Image (tube, coloured by chain):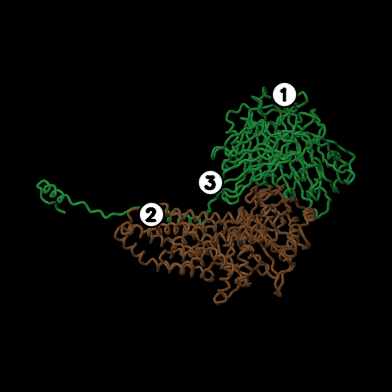
Amino acid sequence: MGLLSDPSRRKVLTGLLTRLNTPICIVCYLAGIVWFMGLAFEPFTLRTYMSENAMGSTMVLLRGAIMMLVCFCSGMPVEWLVKAMQSRGLEVFTQSFSRKLPFPDENKERYMVRGTNVYGILRAPRAPRTEALVISAPCSPGDSNNQAVGLLLALAQYFRNQVYWAKDIIFLVNEHDLMGTQAWLEAYHHTNITGMEYSPLQGRAGSIQAALSLELSSDVITSLDLILEGLNGQLPNLDLANLFYAFCQKLGVLCTIQGKLQRNDWDTAEGYTHAAQTMMLMVLKQACGRSWGDHGLFLRYHIEAASVRGINSFRHYKTDAATIGRLLEGMVRKLNNLLERLHQSYFFYLLPSLSRFVSIGCYMLAFGLLVVILLLRALDLWVHLGAPALAAPSGPGVLTVLTPVVISHLTGVALYLLPVHLQEMAVEHFPVSETEAVVLTAVAIYTAGLALPHNTQRLLSGEGTEQGWKVLKLTALLYLAVLLGCTALINFSLGFILAVTLVPITASMTPHMPKALSALVMVLLSPAFTVLYCVFIYQELIEAPVSVSEGWMLFLSVISQGILDHALYGSLVYPLLALFIYPCWLMFWNILFWS
Amino acid sequence: LDSRLPLVIFLHALTPAAARDEFQEELVIRPLHSGDIYASFQFRTLWDTDFLQEGQKVSHYRLFPKSLGQVLSKFSVRELHISFSQGFWRTMQWGQPFIPSPPGAELWVWFHDTVSDVDGNWKELTNVLSGIFCASLNFIDLTNTVQPSASFKPLGLGNATDHRFLRYATLPREIVCTENLTPWKKLLPCGSKAGLAVLMKSEKLFHSSFHSQAVHIRPICQDEQCSSKAWELRQTLNVVFDLHTSGQGKKEWSLFKMFSRTLTEACPLASSSKVYVDITDNPELFELSPATPLLGQAVVLGDRRTYSVYDLSRAETFGQLRSFNLLLRDMLRPLLHAERYVAGFGLQTGEIHTVIYNNHPYRAFPVLLMDSVPWYLQLYIHTLTVTSKSRDNKPSYIHYQPAKDRHRPHLLEMLIQLPPHSMTEVTVQFERALLKWTEYTPDPNHGFYVGSSVVSALVPSMVAMRTNFTQDQPLFSSFVPVKEESSYFVRVYTEPLLVNLPTPDFSMPYNVICLTCTVVAVGYGSFYNLLTRTFQVDEPSPPLSKRLANLIRRIRGVPLLT
């Protein structure tokens, strides 16, 4: 600090920083990207290990459940399920729920949703109903998930005859996948955050410690996929993933994450690319903030949860349902042994493979290197503004800066509110469906925002001064840094992806650049285009590349899904983009057209 | 010596008359509609003496356990109820128990009104009882003790109403195991050597869905005129066996299968020793082996029930009592039933919901709800709402004692009228306190327990009850005295709650975070300081000689030195 409080040395240091600002920024940006890509390189990652003592050393003897699998033709056989659970000695309850979506969901073809959840509670002997575990299986019409309920019932039958349970076990069969889970969880915790209508629950079992969700569409499988990404990018404790991996190893079941098997050749280019792809998939999935399985909604309630999905590919080696039953039995018994909630291991991590992880301490550096650019630029501007040569007789009025800020945010509010509220009007006037109306309104408002500088200038009296845009840019830079920093703390992936695209343009934008070219670059690196690129990269990574027109359709459906996720489950990505990131980008757009 | 001899003879002649005592034992087996088997043991020791009488020291013990007797007289205890339970009584599946108890340990004591330092006596008493029962009752202190004003009236003789002499505490976390059972068995006159106590083999008793053992001591009347006082010690043990798990689907039961023992004799010290089997639900489907000619009827918990009675004091009972093959039928829904849960998410606030069901088709009745909540859940009592049938239900009596941080828990008692066939919901919001770092338990992420709330009520009975005091009714139907014909007393306990409090991560990353935050705070402070301050180069002040020279020059009118 002495270095900075000494005026002469301080002058030298600030001089150095302002003179070398651009090179330092470029170095930081490149270092950030390289660091991030290096995270997938195996020698830089840590091997996963079980932190929880209660799950680590205790021995669990697996006996295996007797399998009884059933197939459903269509709909939810509520009465049959109630009987089946009762005959297995569970306390059975049902819950009905209904919800009208803000606009029809074209991906899942639903609008007015009405459903029933059935759940049975296995009461642990001599336990005072204070703790519970949940095993859930979504029941949907068609063949997509027809074996999970059978497996669930078989597990229930086997578990009921055991005496070692210390926590109650809730077997939940939910209709309409996530919406059923949402209704059940909200009723269990007596909250209502999304305006769902549901009947109250009759039976409870205390505080839920952990949950597993099963997805199984055939009675033999080749591998099991573990899904961790939950709502708003929340992840369960890493010990849950370790537990799954440990049992897969023990029983010789192939296990995958992001649908990708683990490779051992980390020192080859292919091996590294594989790990990098797996990690990139995780980053993309986490960034989009939606729940990738039924487990994702549990995380809000501080319940560690993961989905286990059976995958049946053309590989020769198959695993039968009895082995999956044993695997789940082992996991549930270990969770049953827990003395405390899972808390020992990491909550923030990236997985380049199931046996390797990157902790928050490593990956945050990549993000930090990107965000420090914004701060350096801000410092540079601050020094320039403070320089006596530029100090105008009267500083720029508060209005000069405040007007663009307020107008940008009003556009953001319009982008957030209007698409859903104006759908009826749009449907009346244009030949489109409700869903298309919502998405296209959003796109239209987004594009209309580009005309903003013109309108701002009309509101402002007088010329925009040199100092004016500098103050505005300083504000915008600091605002963006705070925004990205907060986002990255909650959802690193989202913060990082936004930083990668937003930082270069925001750091370099001035009104003196060639207008047409910079405008093009700014638009190409705007939040909406970031989403579009993510769609293409994601499709590329899951080995289902799409053409440009298909990609565009996917992009539109991603927008509608984002709005729906926000309305149905309380995902925060859409409001974050609409209310904060987009207005912030507009402020820089304003600077470009500063006159 | 000569002078003392007649006194000894006199005392010897007096003793049997002055301290008549009596011991009864009883086992009730009731098949439950869920398919489980409920076995309830009751042992009663009656002693016509008075521990609390002035100037008389009781020192000759026969059937009554000396350890308890001494405790009663030392601490001037008027009434003592202690229970240890493992598991939760599932009222919806199993109906009402004969004597209810909450999960964990529960202790409530009425002290004699001559006691001056009630808190001191209470503290010492809990420590002594902790030793007697090998339990962690010494964890009862002022932070979890309350003085309910209405919910816990004395069950025995005397109508003390001043709740200053009452202390009530629960330990929801207490785990009950064999080490609590052994001292409990030792209090019986025959120990576990003879009589019904032979069946109490811990490996079977703790292999069950529910286990509860209790000791109740109270003064009662010696006879109908109530001219003198007698002390009653009731030891009860309730077990529910899970037929599904251990019966392999067969609904066949025998004493041997349940307890891995058979009965061979009654306790020789017992004046009565009986086994009752509840055959009310469908007598013709029962096949009891051996059959008994004795049938008994008893009105218990508002229901007239029929029992097969086996008298162990008769010789012909033995040798055959082996196997009960029981077929079961549905049972009435319990008229009163309650449950509780924590609503909301996050670690800042929450809401406690207590739901009380009145399943009576047409009668409304009042209940007393008692909640004792630890201080670290800071209740917002202004958010207390009571709703029945989605309408506000104003309690006719509220007694609320706010908590004091680290000293005293919240106590909330309410008298609520339950409309017929209704669900009443009591909600109150709370904020989770941030504890000091030494106040966390060794396993803070497990959560913190909140004891069961207690619902006490006089429930309208379906059948007329006997109100006259008679000696010959079975023990299980005579614990709570019946005051009127049309209703009976029921106490229902809700489940305890497990609440997570904001917990620091007591590990290496926690230290790292603390350190990093300190560094960031220091760095931020200095940077902020530097960024907001404007620096000016200041001329150093001239030395004294120069200033003096300038002063002289000013006087002379000569240009100053710089």
Q: Which mark is residue B10?
A: 1
Say which colour chain B has.
green
Marks 1, 3 in one chain: yes
Q: Are marks 1 and 3 in contact (CB under 8 Å)?
A: no
Q: On the picture, is B427 further left or further right than A46?
A: right
The amino acid on which the numbered mark 2 sits, given as a three-letter code, is Pro
Q: Which mark is residue A396?
A: 2
The amino acid on which the numbered mark 1 sits, given as a three-letter code, is Phe
Marks 2, 1 in one chain: no
Residue A560 position in % (x across, y down): 62, 60
The amino acid on which the numbered mark 3 sits, given as a three-letter code, is Leu
For the residues marked 1 and 3, what is the alpha-carbon distance in whole angstroms?
A: 67 Å
Q: Residues within 10 Å of mark 1 (few under 14, many from 20)?
A: few
Q: A203 or B102, which lies in front? A: A203
The chain assigned the colour brown in the figure is A
Q: Residues within 10 Å of mark 2 (few under 14, many from 20)?
A: some
Q: Helix, strand, or loop for circle 2? A: loop
State the count of labels: 3
Q: Residues within 10 Å of mark 3 (few under 14, many from 20)?
A: some
Q: A108 or B494, which lies in front? A: A108
Q: Earlier in the sequence, mark 1 or mark 3?
A: 1
Based on the displayed image, in which of its 4 quarters is residue A395 positioned? bottom left
For the residues marked 2 and 1, what is the alpha-carbon distance in whole angstroms?
A: 113 Å
**Residue at label 3?**
B434
- The residue at the far left in this view is B556
Q: B512 or A484, which lies in front? A: A484
